[in-house]
């Protein structure tokens, strides 16, 4: 609808400009525009065109639009020739004009009379509000900040009010007040607050029952009747309690006892009876009880620890997030069918997955068997056993692999990797992989490896997958020469043999290393690697690599702490200092006593100033702590 260059529709809360003396046509010629155009659009009862306007469609179920009898005096006495003052039986509004109990006297306009709690007239329904409580509803209130909304209402409300049980239901905000004067003042605040989008804030106020949390507990005699009713519904042979549709139980209805399990007090009473009388309960049926929240059921974890079957079917659970409140229950059977939450899933598989995420031991859902759960049936948290170190399978393989790795990494870390050509088969292949990360590669220590990473989880292009796979030993070694210079901590190596036959040996090497800058100094960052070598026999006692899979990642805090602690081996290419005769004799004796080769024995003696006893003590200590690598014992 266009008006003065502005457009408004039935969903617009903005108030259009008011026009006075504007003449219309037809049967309503000369109609008074003493109210805003918007009020007429939304079904104001005086004036208008005789029927409810689009406003009725905006109100939530069960709300009754309040009469305008509580407007200020100027608007009450303004002349309106089309106000239908003589109309009788005007439904919910005219009941207040008949001078009844809620009307406050003949000729009065209903509305609120006086400030007493629950006294005086009523609105939106006629009759006296016996509870003294009023429910305040803000349509579309979800979009407002709670603090802002309540403060904005208080700023223009003529009476200080205390909101009780503020909550959000769909897009609406609700709270309660227990003062009729405050309710009347809040009703007058409707359309007087403009939000940041230029819309007017609506305020609906209606007489209401007390908030649910204020409902009194069941009386002692009622609790006794409830206990007897539950005893009648309990099957001791199955340890099962059937509370299906308990609110209609004849024994309770005949005693005028209301047990409504979607109320906090009723559910707490039931759980207390379970705790005191049947803590060994195994099956509980709560179907057909209009349950929409599971907060109170969380207590069943401690009150009924043996509960294995729970029936919540035919209730009003709207979200699977409610199940989080009871996920500590060790359920094997659960019923949820005929709840609104079941309609939220695109298929049965996603429904089962969401439920089993909360109850991993579940074997039956809605009466249907589920596949056995996959997982570790561990009751208490257990510590993962420590790593047991390398696994070779036999001493023969151990010597073969350690000798190969000592040669390989002495060349790899030497600065010139070209001699590694002898270690690879003519048709060898190599691939490099780094973990997938959204971090900018240039800011990551793995940046220099990222561009060549063949991470199949990240890389979907088959052409790039093939291109990043290095083929033939020439291409493999050329690629290795382009990688940063390194220094590996051989003492950190862990070796695991995967496969061993007469014609093939596959093993994995894991450890840490540092990159070495051009000036020969190592960088601060410590990296970790895992490398799978697939080899075939070469010569009399050598290995030849046919496939090399290198995975590089950032080292963990523990790996960094333990890195490069053990003494590094003396490179075989470095010059061997000339030893005196006593040193040669001491070296031979130390090698025999320790079991280490001459190279490592000499290193140990040299680091301890050729003090045999001191070197032996340090050796014993390092060996006990597992800090001497296996390569030190290869002779």
Image: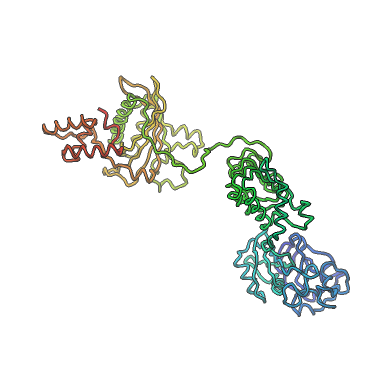
Estimate the x, y position of residue 356 in percent, counting from the top left.
60, 42
The quarter in which the N terminus is drawn is bottom right
Res 20 seen here: yes
Asked where in the image residue 435 lies, by quadrant, the reply is: top left
Please state if 621 lies on the left or on the right of 6 as rendered: left
Q: Is residue 20 above or below residue 407?
A: below
Foreground of the two, 256 or 402: 256
Asked where in the image residue 535 lies, by quadrant, the reply is: top left
Estimate the x, y position of residue 126 in percent, counting from the top left.
81, 69
Please state if 545 lies on the left or on the right of 44 as rendered: left
Res 170 seen here: no
Q: Is residue 82 above or below residue 209?
A: below
Estimate the x, y position of residue 344 in percent, counting from the top left.
67, 46
Foreground of the two, 423 or 298: 298
Q: Is residue 221 above or below residue 120?
A: above
Please state if 387 lies on the left or on the right of 258 as rendered: left
The quarter in which the C terminus is drawn is top left
Estimate the x, y position of residue 456 in percent, counting from the top left.
48, 36
Foreground of the two, 81 or 630: 630
Foreground of the two, 109 or 195: 109
Please state if 217 lies on the left or on the right of 535 as rendered: right
Q: Name the residue located 64 percent from the left edge and 50 percent from the top edge.
A: 277
- The total of numbered circles placed on residues is 0
């Amino acid at each position: 609808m266009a008006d003065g260059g502005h457009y408004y529709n039935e969903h617009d809360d903005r108030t259009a400009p008011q026009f006075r003396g504007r003449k219309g046509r037809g049967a309503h010629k000369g109609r008074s525009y003493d109210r805003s155009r918007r009020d007429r659009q939304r079904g104001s009862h005086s004036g208008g065109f005789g029927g409810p306007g689009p406003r009725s469609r905006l109100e939530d179920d069960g709300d009754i639009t309040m009469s305008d009898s509580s407007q200020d005096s100027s608007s009450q006495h303004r002349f309106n020739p089309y106000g239908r003052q003589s109309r009788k039986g005007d439904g919910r509004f005219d009941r207040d004009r008949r001078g009844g109990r809620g009307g406050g006297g003949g000729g009065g306009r209903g509305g609120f009379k006086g400030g007493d709690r629950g006294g005086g007239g009523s609105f939106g329904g006629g009759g006296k509000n016996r509870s003294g409580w009023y429910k305040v509803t803000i349509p579309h209130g979800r979009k407002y900040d709670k603090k802002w909304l309540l403060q904005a209402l208080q700023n223009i409300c003529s009476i200080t009010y205390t909101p009780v049980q503020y909550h959000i239901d769909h897009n609406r905000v609700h709270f309660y007040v227990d003062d009729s004067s405050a309710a009347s003042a809040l009703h007058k605040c409707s359309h007087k607050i403009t939000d940041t989008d230029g819309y007017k804030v609506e305020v609906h106020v209606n007489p209401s029952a007390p908030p649910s949390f204020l409902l009194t507990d069941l009386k002692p005699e009622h609790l006794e009747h409830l206990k007897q009713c539950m005893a009648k519904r309990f099957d001791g042979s199955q340890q099962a309690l059937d509370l299906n549709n308990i609110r209609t139980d004849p024994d309770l209805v005949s005693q005028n006892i209301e047990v409504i399990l979607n109320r906090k007090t009723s559910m707490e009473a039931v759980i207390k009876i379970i705790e005191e009388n049947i803590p060994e309960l195994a099956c509980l049926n709560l179907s057909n009880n209009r349950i929409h929240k599971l907060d109170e059921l969380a207590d069943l974890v401690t009150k009924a620890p043996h509960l294995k079957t729970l029936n919540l079917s035919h209730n009003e659970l709207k979200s699977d997030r409610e199940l989080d409140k009871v996920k500590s229950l060790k359920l094997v059977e659960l019923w949820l069918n005929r709840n609104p939450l079941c309609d939220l899933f695109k298929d049965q598989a996603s429904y089962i997955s969401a439920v089993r995420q909360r109850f991993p031991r579940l074997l039956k859902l809605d009466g249907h068997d589920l596949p056995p759960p996959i997982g570790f049936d561990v009751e208490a948290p257990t510590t993962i056993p420590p790593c047991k170190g390398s696994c070779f399978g036999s001493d023969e393989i151990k010597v073969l692999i350690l000798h190969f790795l000592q040669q390989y990494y002495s060349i790899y870390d030497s600065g010139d990797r070209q001699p590694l050509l002898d270690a690879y088969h003519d048709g060898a292949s190599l691939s490099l992989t780094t973990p997938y990360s959204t971090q900018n590669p240039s800011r990551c220590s793995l940046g220099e490896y990222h561009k060549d990473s063949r991470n199949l989880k990240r890389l979907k292009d088959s052409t790039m997958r093939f291109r990043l796979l290095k083929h033939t030993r020439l291409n493999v070694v050329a690629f290795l020469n382009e990688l940063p210079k390194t220094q590996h901590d051989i003492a950190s190596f862990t070796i695991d043999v995967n496969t061993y036959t007469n014609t093939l040996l596959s093993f994995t090497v894991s450890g840490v290393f540092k990159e070495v800058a051009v000036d020969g100094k190592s960088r601060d960052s410590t990296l970790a690697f895992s490398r799978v070598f697939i080899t075939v026999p070469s010569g009399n006692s050598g290995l030849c690599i046919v496939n090399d899979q290198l995975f590089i990642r950032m080292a963990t805090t523990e790996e960094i702490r333990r890195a490069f602690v053990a003494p590094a081996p003396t490179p075989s290419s470095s010059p061997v200092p000339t030893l005196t005769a006593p040193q040669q004799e001491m070296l031979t004796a130390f090698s025999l006593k320790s079991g280490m080769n001459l190279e490592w024995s000499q290193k140990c003696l040299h680091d301890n100033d050729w003090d045999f006893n001191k070197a032996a003590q340090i050796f014993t200590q390092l060996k006990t702590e597992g800090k001497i690598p296996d390569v030190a014992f290869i002779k």
